[in-house]
Image: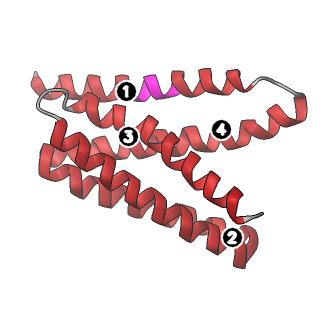
């Protein structure tokens, strides 16, 4: 795989992660959220870019064994993002960060898995986009319900 493909993959991973995680963070604190959402965009972007570069290097040198770093760095990203969110929303940051990271990890994993099916069976990528929107919507709804339960 060439450098251009790796860079493109990192950009796609970053944009899709932001598209999934940021609405979840925003759904938790919709009011007065500019600084919070900006901080989460920066934290998510930095963890995502660093994680993807390290994972690509690990896969290059270790083959499929490099994927073990994925789980380690997903956990690290969770803790970093939860730590940043903690300054804006307190203890709830750990739940919201968990939901956001689970959503992007789940959708990313399903997307990668289903890309193989799309390629093998000639299905449309629109199917994947619709599936990703539905799953992201479910995670956002979980955050909204959790947030409402805190107010009761």
Label 1 sits on residue: 140
Q: Position of residue 1 (x, y in %)?
A: 78, 63
Q: Do the residues labelled 1 and 3 touch (CB within 8 Å)?
A: no
- Real-space CA distance between mark 3 and mark 2, rounded to the nearest whole angstrom: 27 Å
Q: Mark 1 Cα within 10 Å, few/some/many (few <14, many 20+)? A: many
Gap in angstroms between the C-alphas marked 4 and 2: 19 Å
Q: Considering only order in the chain, which callout, 2 or 4, is on the residue closer to the N terminus?
A: 2
> What residue do we see at 17% from left, 35% from top?
33
Q: Mark 2 packing: few (<14 Cα in 10 Å), some, or many (20+)? A: some
* Residue under the point 27% across and 22% down: 145
Q: Which of marks 3 and 2 is in front?
A: 2
Q: Mark 2 = which residue?
A: 59
Label 3, on which residue? 99
In depth, the one of 77 and 44 nearer the eye is 44
Instruction: Specify the quadrant of the image occupied by residue 138.
Output: top left
Q: Residues within 10 Å of mark 3 (few under 14, many from 20)?
A: many
Closer mark to the observer between disc 4 and disc 3: 4
Looking at the rendering, the stretch of residues picked out in magenta corresponds to 135-140
Q: Mark 4 points at which residue?
A: 111
């Amino acid at each position: 795989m060439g450098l251009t493909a790796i860079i493109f993959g990192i950009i796609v991973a970053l944009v899709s992660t932001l598209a999934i995680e940021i609405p979840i963070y925003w759904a938790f604190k919709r009011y007065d959220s500019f600084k919070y959402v900006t901080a989460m965009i920066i934290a998510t972007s930095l963890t995502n870019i660093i994680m993807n570069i390290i994972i690509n290097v690990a896969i290059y040198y270790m083959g499929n064994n490099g994927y073990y770093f994925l789980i380690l760095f997903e956990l690290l990203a969770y803790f970093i993002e939860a730590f940043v969110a903690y300054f804006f929303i307190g203890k709830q940051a750990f739940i919201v960060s968990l939901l956001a990271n689970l959503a992007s990890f789940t959708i990313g994993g399903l997307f990668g898995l289903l890309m193989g099916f799309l390629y093998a069976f000639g299905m449309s990528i629109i199917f994947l986009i619709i599936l990703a929107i539905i799953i992201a919507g479910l995670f956002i709804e979980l955050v909204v319900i959790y947030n409402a339960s805190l107010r009761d």
